[in-house]
Amino acid sequence: MSLTANSPSASRPAARRRKPAGLLSELLGDRPAVLATGFLLLIVFVAILVPLIVPHDPAAQALRARLDPPAWLAGGSWSHVLGTDNLGRDVLSRIMYGARTSLSISLTVCAIASTFGIAMGLIAAYVGGRTDTILMRIVDTQLSFPDLLLALTVLTVLGSSPVTVVIILSISGWMVYARMTRGIVVSARHEGYVEAAELVGCSMPRIILRHILPNIAAPLSTLLILEFARVVLAEAALSFLGMGIQPPATSWGLDIALGKDHVFGAWWLVTFPGLAIALTILSANVLAAWARVTTDPQEREKRFARTVARRSGSKRR
Amino acid sequence: MTPPPLLEIEDLVVSFTTRRGVFEAVRGVSLHVEPGETLGIVGESGSGKSVTMQAVMGLIEAPGAIERGAMRWNGEPLSGTRHGPRAAVAGREIAMVFQDAMTSLNPLLTVGVQITEVLRRHKGLKAAAASARASELLRLVGITNPEGRLHYLPHQFSGGMRQRIMIAMALAAEPALLIADEPTTALDVTIQAQIVDLLAELRDRLHLSVVLVTHDMGLVAELCDRVAVMYAGRIVETAPVQELFAAPAHPYTAGLLRSMPRLDDSAGRLEAIEGSPPDPSDLPEGCAFRTRCPRAQEDCIHDPLTTDLGSGRGVACWHPLAPPVAHGQEARVHAGE
Amino acid sequence: MPESEMAKQADPAKRLVEFTDVSVAYDVQRAAFWHRKPPPFRAIDGVSFQIGRGETLGVVGESGSGKSTIGKALLGRAPLATGNISFDGRDISKLSGAAMRRLRRHIQPVLQDPYASLNPRMRVADIIAEPLLVHGIARGKEAEARVAQLLNLVGLPSDTASRHPGSFSGGQRQRIGIARALAVEPDFIVADEPVSALDVSIRAQIINLFRDLQQELGVAYLFIAHDLAIVRHVSHRIAVVYAGRVAEIGPRDAIYGSPQHPYTRALLDAVPIPDPARRGERRPTIRGEFGRPGDEDHGCRFAPRCPLATKICREAVPPLAAKAPGHLAACWNS
C-alpha cells in the first residue's frame, strides 16, 4: 500500500456515482493540497529511485571536505549542494537515503497496524458482549500509556533494529484503527441497507464484506495519512534518541542527532533533515484535511461552492 | 391607493452551486402575503418552497446564493446580502416554525432559557418579566403548568409538545408573519390535528399572517385563504383556496388533488401522476411539468407565462384545465372521475 | 382472547400468517446502577390476528404504538415474550439463525426509507439480484435476466440495472426496493410505512404498484402506516393498534364505515378533509398524547385520552370482542 494509492480509494464510492467533476481536477483546484501531494510524491519518488539518482555514497567520508556549507554560501561547492557533515558526508545524499528509511518504516507500520487494528475492531463490533468490552479496554489502556516511553523501554531491553522499530510502532499504533472500525461497524449496522441485507437473508460474512466494510474506505484514508505522519515523527524521534535506526544506516532523526553538536557552526546539518521531516508531516496533514473534506459529500459541495465563488470573484475584479 | 402587502417577493432566484453544476432551486418566484392572510405554499420536496422561505428569513447559506429578486416588507426593501436579508426584520417581525422541533431546539438548555432569550433580545425584557411572559406564551400554546415546564429540557417533552414550544418561541417576539415550514409532518396524525387547530386558533386570536409551507393538500384546505402551488422552482398556480380545490387550473394541481388518498371517495385504484419530480439540475426545457403532464403538447417546450385568470388567480400553463369563464364545470367532471 | 372468533376471519386452508397472543418485550436499561432494574418494555402485548394468502392486512397506529414491532416480529427481529407466530402452518417463533435465513425466501421486507435502504455503493442490478444469490436461486446470466424482468414488473426502465441508487428519486428507489423484495417470489411482504418518506405525487403510484403486484403475483402484505387514508387503498382488512394492543380489527369497509373503537374514530377524524368548503366540519379530536405502554397496566390503555371512558375502562382491560362478523374491537363502550 503506498500513499498515493490511498487518496483515490477514499472517494471511490463518490467517483462511481458518475460525478462530472473529476477527483484530479478537484485536487488541482486546491493549491495547498496540490503542493502537499507534490511534495509527498517527490519523497516517494526519491525513496524509490535513490540508488540511481543519489549524487554521493551517503556513508563515504571525505575528510578534506568536512563541514562544507551549502553550495550557495561562501566556501560551498556544487558537488555538495546541501553541504557536508563533520565526516565530510554529503547531506543531500543522506537526506535522500533517510527518505527511503522513513518511508519504508512508516508504510510498513501503517500496513501492519491498520490490518491488525481493523481486524480487532471488526471482532469487537461483531462478537460484541464481553469480547468487545475487553478489546476496547485494552485499546483504552494502551492509548492512555505514553507510546514513546513504551517504545524506548522495549527498545532498550531488546536492542534496536529496523525490524524492532517497526514492531514497536505497529504495536503502539493499532488502537486508533480498531476504535475507528468498531465505531463505523456499530453505526453501519443501523443503516437501512444493512438491515435490509439481513432481512433479505444475507449471511453475516457477506453483510460484513459487502455492506459494512466499504464504509471504512473513506475515514481510513484520512486516518492512514495522519498515522503515516505520526509514524514518520515517531521514527525520527526514536532515531534521534539513539534507539531507532543505527549508523551506518541513515535516517532523518539520526541525521539531526549527529548534527546537533555542530548546530552553531554548521546549521545545515540539522536544518535540512529537520525541514524534510517538517515538510513531510505538514504535507501529510494538509492532504489528510483535503481527504477528509473530499470524503464528506456535504463538506465537499461546500468547498466546491467556495472555490467557484472565489474564482468568479477574482475574475470580476 | 391600496396599502402595500405585508411581504412581497418579486422574481426571486436562488441558485445552488454543486459539483454537477449550478442549478436554480427557485426560478423566479413572485408572491405576496397580505395582512391577516394565510398563504399556503404547496409543493413536493425539491420544488423550492422551503428555499423561498429560507431566503425571506436570510437562511440561505453557501453553496446557496440569492441571484436575483426583490423582497419587500411593508413596502420597504428587505436589504441584505447574497444570502438573504439581515436579521432586523427576519426573526422579529417574521418568525419561523420548522418541521423538526427536536433539531431546532437546543437540547442542552431548558425551554425557559430558550424562550426568554428571544424575549430579552427582541423585546428587551428583564429576567423576571421575561420568564413571566415565557410561561404566558406556553399557556397560549396549550401547555398546562407552564411555570413548571419552563425548567424542562426539550427531550422531556413529546413531539407534539415540542412543536407547541417551537410555536411559542416563534410568537415570543410578537411577529406579524409566521412562516410554518411543514409544521406537522413529523407528528402523529392525532397530534397533527391538534397542532393545526392550535395554529388556526392563534392566527385568529393574534391576527397573524401565516405562510404555511406544506406538501399536504388536506392541511391547505383546513387552514389557508390562498394557495401558491410550486413545481420545480416556480409557482405554477395561485388561487383562493376554494377555487383551487373546486377547479384547479394547472394539470399538476389537478393531479395532486386527484392522487391524494382520502377517506371520502371509493377505495379503488388511486389516480397517480406518472413519472417522478425532475432533477433540479436537469430540468426539462420549457414547462418543467411537461414530461409528466397528460395535457402536454408541442408548445409546452416553451416556457409558459403566468396568465392572469382574474379574481386573484394565476396559472403558468399553456393548456390550463379550467377556462377562466366557465371554471368549475370542467373541474366537476374531474372530481367525478 | 376470543380465538374462536378470530379464526372465522380467514379460511384455515388459506391462512398464511397467524399471530397468537404475541408479546414482544425489550429489556430496559436501568437509569443508574443503583436503581432497580425496570420491568421489560412491552412493545406489543397479546396481539393476535391472521392473514390469508394473497390478502393485505393494513396496520395503523401512532409512533410507539408497536405497529412496526408487529412487522419486526414477523421478520424474526423482535424478542418474543409470549405467544407464537406461525407461517404457512409452521411455528416460526423459535427459529435458529440458519432456519430464519431460509424462511426469508418466503417473507421479504420493504422498508420505510428508500434513501437508506439501498446500498449506495452497489449497482441496482446487484441490489436486486442479492436475494437470488444468497438463497441460491440464480446467478450470472440467469440472475441478470430475472433482474430485467423484475425491473419491468415494477415499472422501471431496463437501463436502471447498471446505475447506482444515488441517481434515483425516492419513488424510483422504493420501486427498486420492491423489486428486491419480489426477487425470490415471496408469499409475504412486510411493508413498513413504504410510502411515508415519498412525495405526495409519488405515493399514489407506489400504492397502486402494491395493488397491481398483488393481483398479478398473489403475494400477501402486512402494510404498516400511520394514517388511515393511506392503507385504505391497499388493505382488505385493517388492524388499528394502540399502545401495543389491537384496538380494533376488521374488514376495510367496516373500519371506515362503522368504526367501533373511539380511537379508530379519532384517527378518522384526524385526517384533514381536503375540501375547503367543508372546513370546520372535522370534529374535535382527542386531546393529549399517548403514554408509553406499560405505564398503566390496569384497564384500557386508551382510557386517559378517551372521551367515552368510564370507571370500568380504568379498571379492566377490555377484551377484543366481535361487534360484527369478523369485526372486533377492544372497547367496553361500543
Image (cartoon, coloured by chain):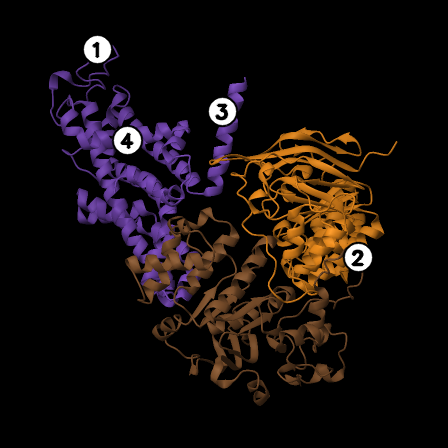
Chain colours: A purple, B orange, C brown
Quadrant containing the N terminus of chain C in the rendered view: bottom right
SS for callout 3: helix
Relative to A255, say whether B159 is above or below: below
Which numbered tag is attached to residue A311? 3
The picture places residue C32, in percent across and down from the top left corner, at 54, 67
Which residue: 49% across, 70% down? C72
Q: Can you say whether B125 is above or below C174 in the image?
A: above
Task: Give, as a three-letter code, the residue at label 4.
Answer: Leu
Q: Which residue is mark 2?
A: C277
Mark 2 or 4: in front is 2
Residue B182's spot in the image, x, y percent? Answer: 66, 51
What is the distance, in whole Å, between disc 3 and disc 4 at their CAs?
27 Å
CB atoms of marks 1 and 4 within 8 Å:
no
Q: On what subunit does the disc labeled 1 rest?
A: A
- Tell me, for residue A75, which label it has, or none: 1
For the question of whether residue B302 can be seen, the reply is yes
Marks 3 and 1 in Cβ contact (< 8 Å): no
